Structures are given as C-alpha cells and as structure tokens.
Image: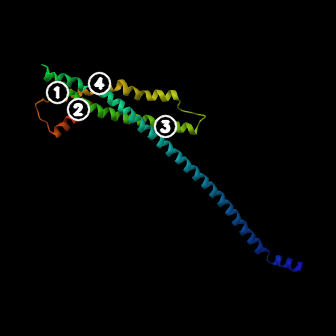
Amino acid sequence: MFSSIKNFLYRHKKKFMVTGAIFGSVYLLMSYAQKRLREWQEKEAKKFFEMTRKKQHFESTERTCNQTILSLSKIVSESILSILNTEEIIQKLQDNPDNKVTLWEQMKIMIFTRICVIVYALSILNVTLRVQLNVIGGYLYRDSMHEDDPLINSELQAKYLSLCHHFVGPGVEDLSKQIEKAVKRVVEPISLKKKITLQEVEQVFWSIQTILCT
C-alpha cells in the first residue's frame, strides 16, 4: 500500500510541485494584498480624522470670528456715533440760533461722514479680524500637531491682535478725520437748497471713495 502511494507521488511529483508553487504564490499574493489593504485603510482613516479635525478647527475659528466681530461691531458703531454726534447740532438747531445755516452745513457734512465711516470701519474690522484670527488659528492648529516646536505663544497672539484693538480705539477716530476731509471736498459745494436725486447721492459716495483711494 505504501509502495503504491510512493509510486503515485513519484509519478505526479511535478504536478504536486506546480500545484504547491501555485498555492504558495496565491498565499503570498493574498498576504501582500491584505497588508496593502490594511495600510491603505489606516492611511485613509488617518486622512479622514485629519480632515475632520481641520474642519472642526476651522468651524471653531469661524464661530470665534463671528462672535468677536458682532461684539466689536457694536463698540465701533457706538464710538462712531459718539465721535460724529449729530444730537448736539440738533439741540442747537431747536433753539433757532442765528448761525442756523452754519449748523445745517455741519449737519450735512456729518451725516455723509457718519455713513461713510460706518461702512469703512465695519468693513475694515471684519476683514482684519478674520485674517488675524484665521492666521492665529492656523498657527495654533500647526502647534497642536507639533507641540515640541511651537511657532506662536500667548504674548505673540496678544501683540498681533493689538492691531485690531488699536483700530477699535484711536483708529476709528483717525479714520473719521480722514473721511471727513474727503466728504468736505465733495459735499461742501452742494447747496442746502438743492434737491438731489438718488443717482446724485450715489455719485457723491463714489466721488468720496475716489478721493479716499487716491
């Protein structure tokens, strides 16, 4: 019996060798494929978590931007209304003073100036603050990935954001003065008795903008 088995194996030795080689190759190929699949899955999982983390960080930065802008916009608006206070002129006009025309001229200048300052100031605040917070947010995200080699600290953050704090304070007053000069050049020649159309008002603002940009 053993002799028959031996003869059978001997006669089909090449077939068994080929079959073994095929199965061995298939096994190695499957093992390699499984290894590559695991590596790909780990890589994709890492990429997914990284994207999720970035998205959460960006959304958090955006929420901070929106909340900060909303808060500072109120402060800036109140500062502008205080600097360009039309209430004082209105109170004087109610007393029917001799310099009524002069006061109305001041009111005309102040109204146009206030509108321009509000638009410019809030636009500057919005853009500046978003840039600053996103830059800081980017550095903080990078530092969270490389804690041993931080690029930004709290002191540097404070110095960077102080630019925006300066604008909210004396910066608004400086902006108001610059815009008022441009407004006077455009609006002073317009007579108080002149009825102006909406298109003419639009042209006034375009003229003011042109002066400010040159």
Please say if 130 is above or below 179. below
Left or right: 64 in relation to 39: left
Give the left or right position of residue 86, taking residue 46 as reference: left
Inter-mark Cα distance, 3 to 1: 46 Å
Real-space Cα distance between discs 4 and 1? 20 Å
**Which quarter shows the N terminus?**
bottom right
Eye-nearest disc, 2 or 4: 4
Circle nearer the viewer, 1 or 2: 1
How crowded is the residue under tag 3: few (<14 C-alpha within 10 Å), some, or many (20+)?
A: some
Graded by Cα atoms within 10 Å as few (under 14), some (14 to 19) or many (20 or more), the crowding at tag 4 reads some
Amino acid type of the residue tagged 3 in the rendering = Gly
Marked residue nearer the N-terminal end (2 or 3): 3
Q: Which residue is mark 2?
A: 208
Instruction: Identify the secondary structure beneath mark 3.
Output: helix
Amino acid type at circle 1 is Glu
Coordinates of residue 69 in the picture (x, y in percent): 39, 35
Foreground: 65 or 180?
65
Q: Which residue is mark 3?
A: 137
Residue located farthest toward the front when viewing the structure as drawn? 95
Task: State the image coordinates of residue 184 (x, y, percent, origin top left).
Answer: 20, 26
Q: Is residue 58 left or right of residue 106?
A: right
Question: Is tag 2's residue or tag 4's residue first in the polypeptide sequence?
Answer: 4
| Residue toward you, 112 or 210 | 112
- The answer to whether marks 3 and 1 mark residues whose Cβ atoms lie closer than 8 Å is no
Identify the residue under disc 4: 83
| Mark 1–mark 2 distance (CA, rounded to whole Å) | 12 Å
- Specify which label sits upstream in the sequence, 3 or 4: 4
As drawn, the label of residue 188 is 1
- Kindly tell me whether residue 214 is visible in this rendering: no
**Gap between marks 2 and 4 measured at Cα:** 19 Å
Is label 1 in a helix, a strand or a loop? Answer: loop
